[in-house]
Amino acid sequence: MSGEQSREIADYVKSIQPDCLVSGRIGNRFGDYMSTGDNKIPAVPYNGDWEVPATLNDTWGYKYFDNNWKSTKEVIKLLVKINSRGGNYLLNIGPDGKGIIPKPSVDILRQVGDWILSNSESIYATNPVPVFPYEIEWGMFTHKPKKLFMHLFDCKQKLDIHCLANKIKKAYVLSTGEKIEFTQPYTLSLAQHRVSFTLPNIKPDKIDTVICIETEEDEIMLDSLDNF
């Protein structure tokens, strides 16, 4: 579409419903937010409002032959990954010709909903997380003022976070309130910003165990690896 066509459509939508959000796919920078490619997640946080249009299997809408459904854990991992980067997860659900949502879709959504009921604080009203200066293979992070949430998809007995310079007040399992022991040395040694967590006795969530780390500071403070 030409810029003139994009503007005409956007202006028409706003004339009918001023508070309506227009997708970035209208083109020519006339959208209210950026829409990524299908099932594409930015590698780093995007500066502005954005969303990921995504599918529960391999196709859009309803396809009777497409039974390659994502697992509940896959959907939650995608949700957390998008959320940690400040995006919205636009998940496609396709009814069949009778208007019925396929049972696999219903099952996945109910299981995702059950998990969110216990862990909603780590998902709703969170902010983009700064990119940690190293790769973390066991999980992801979400954040809101004074709270950093560790999403553990592979729950271990001991975890270390490097470069986190916040003063930690306490840590606990978000869904149960179970206390998590941690050590945070404050010296001039090489380990001054290495936080170690011990999780020997907790019962891990089979999908995503969320640890809430309460901090004195509102924002996440990261130290540079140059100091190590």
Image (spheres, rainbow, N blue to C red):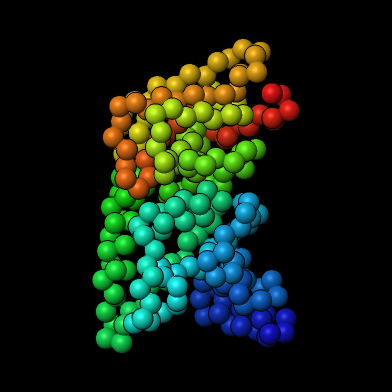
Instruction: State which quadrant residue 198 falls in.
Output: top left
Task: Please indicate, yes or no, whether residue 197 appears anywhere in the rendered image.
Answer: yes
Q: Position of residue 216 (x, y in %)?
A: 51, 25
Which quarter of the picture shows residue 29? Answer: bottom right
Q: Position of residue 134 (x, y in %)?
A: 62, 38
Residue at 41% from the left image edge and 41% from the top image edge: 154
Residue at horizontal 56 percent and vertical 51 percent from the top = 85
* Residue 218 as seen in the image, left or right of residue 27: left
Q: Is residue 177 left or right of residue 37?
A: left
Along the horizontal axis of the image, is 174 left or right of 88?
left
Placement of the N terminus among the 4 image quadrants: bottom right
Q: In the displayed structure, would residue 87 be above or below residue 224? A: below
15 w.r.t. 156: above or below:
below
Q: Quadrant of residue 181?
A: top left
Tell which of 160 and 164 is nearer to you. Answer: 160
Locate residue 12, reporting x and y percent: 59, 83
Write the residue at 47% across / 29% down: 159
The one nearer the camera, 133 or 34, is: 133
- The quadrant of the picture occupied by the C terminus is top right
